[in-house]
Amino acid sequence: MNFDHFKYNKASLPSDADERQKLFKQLEQEFYEELKNSETAKEYFANYRLDSIENFIKTYASRKVHLLQCYEFYSNEYHEKEITELDYQKQAEEMLQMILQKKLFNMQLRWRAGQLVIDGIDIAYDFEFWTKHILDCPFIPTITNHELELMKEYLLRFNEEDDVDELYISWQDYDSLTKKDEHGDMENMPDWYDFYDSRMGTRMLLLLPNHKGTMEDFYLDFWRKPAETVNPPVNNPEPAPYLYGWGTDIFDFAKHFEKDKYFSALFKYYKYYEEKDHRRPNFEDLKETIQYLLIADRPIYLKSHLTWDKALMAAAKEYRNTKIAEALDFAFDEYQMMKELGFSKDKSPEEITKEYANDHLVQLFREKILQGRVQNGEPKDFNY
């Protein structure tokens, strides 16, 4: 389908980035209100659990905004025209962020044990906030040359089972990362964290007690229990199905609800993209692999002990890691210069302070922990 006359064609969007973001936020709210007030939607939702509807509506509205922002991408994917570009400098900067994430996680381990007081950290969830602003976190010690060389070593070692592209991980999620399996292993711990600990001798930090986290759970229980008393759980022998904001639930609802031909087409394209990805689980990996190999600036050799697809992916990964390692020195020089000059890579301190104050989860945890302390006859502060 030609999207030249699409209401949200990129040519009709504001050229200013801030104005575009403002428009997207406004459209998400409009889509949300449209669903909330739609009789068609209400009729559809009547078949699903009530407690799943609000989240589904929010997710669906957000997904529509995502589709109008990326309509060219999904249209090109549908017609097999995706173009992949590589940016090794950006990936090198992401490796520096991985170093900072590990340094922050080690600080969190000591903070939870009561060994470290950090100006700017009152509650455990503060670490989750700073993981989103890792380059501008004011209290993380500067990356050292030794840590830079350690990252290069990590990138250049070869193990076809490992993957340094771990940026999807919730780097500061203490409960998830330290959870042990039936063998006593922390299977969710990032490979980079394990590598860092093995070279820096910091693995013992994982044995420190979680005093702060235990106390926070204790205080949070005070506001959870009254809510359970006021709203006792209702036993429903045949609960309505939960309406999820992904997969077939999204597509089934779109087919039922969408009347705009462009959005109908976009959801069709999006469904095709998702189904293609599930049918051929290695297809996207192989496409990316071939892109790496096609633009390689040196001879690439395949490992003879691997099958053809694994050999291709291993060769591309080894080449990619080499290129990132080569770009690390420049990224590190820029990082040091920014630190020395006091420049912000992400947002200004004022902007981050404002974002912290507006972070719903941060403020919720702060409020409920303080309430718990007061209800337990303790001071309304974070000195626990």
Image: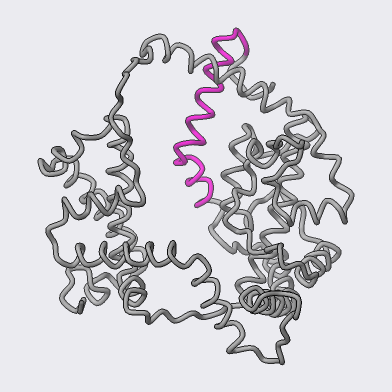
226 to 169, vertically: above or below: above
296 to 370, vertically: above or below: below
Q: Residue at x 68, y 63 (%)?
A: 163
- Figure label count: 0
Q: Is residue 137 magenta?
A: no
Q: Main secondary structure of the magenta part?
A: helix
Considering the image in quadrants, where does the N terminus appear? bottom left
Q: Is residue 357 magenta?
A: yes
Q: Is residue 213 left or right of residue 83?
A: right
Nearer to us in this view, 85 or 12: 85
Q: Give the magenta-colored segment's residue range.
A: 351-378
Nearer to us in this view, 65 or 268: 268
Nearer to us in this view, 321 or 48: 48
Q: Position of residue 127 (x, y in %)?
A: 63, 42
The colour style of the image is: one colour
Please tell me in which quadrant of the rendered image residue 265 appears: bottom left
Q: Position of residue 122 (x, y in %)?
A: 63, 32
Q: Is residue 169 left or right of residue 208?
A: left
Q: Residue at x 56, y 82 (%)?
A: 290
Q: Position of residue 52 (x, y in %)?
A: 32, 35
Q: Position of residue 359 (x, y in %)?
A: 47, 41
Q: Residue at x 70, y 52 (%)?
A: 190
Considering the image in quadrants, where does the C terminus appear? top right
Please tell me in which quadrant of the rendered image residue 180 appears: top right
Q: Is residue 217 left or right of residue 187?
A: left
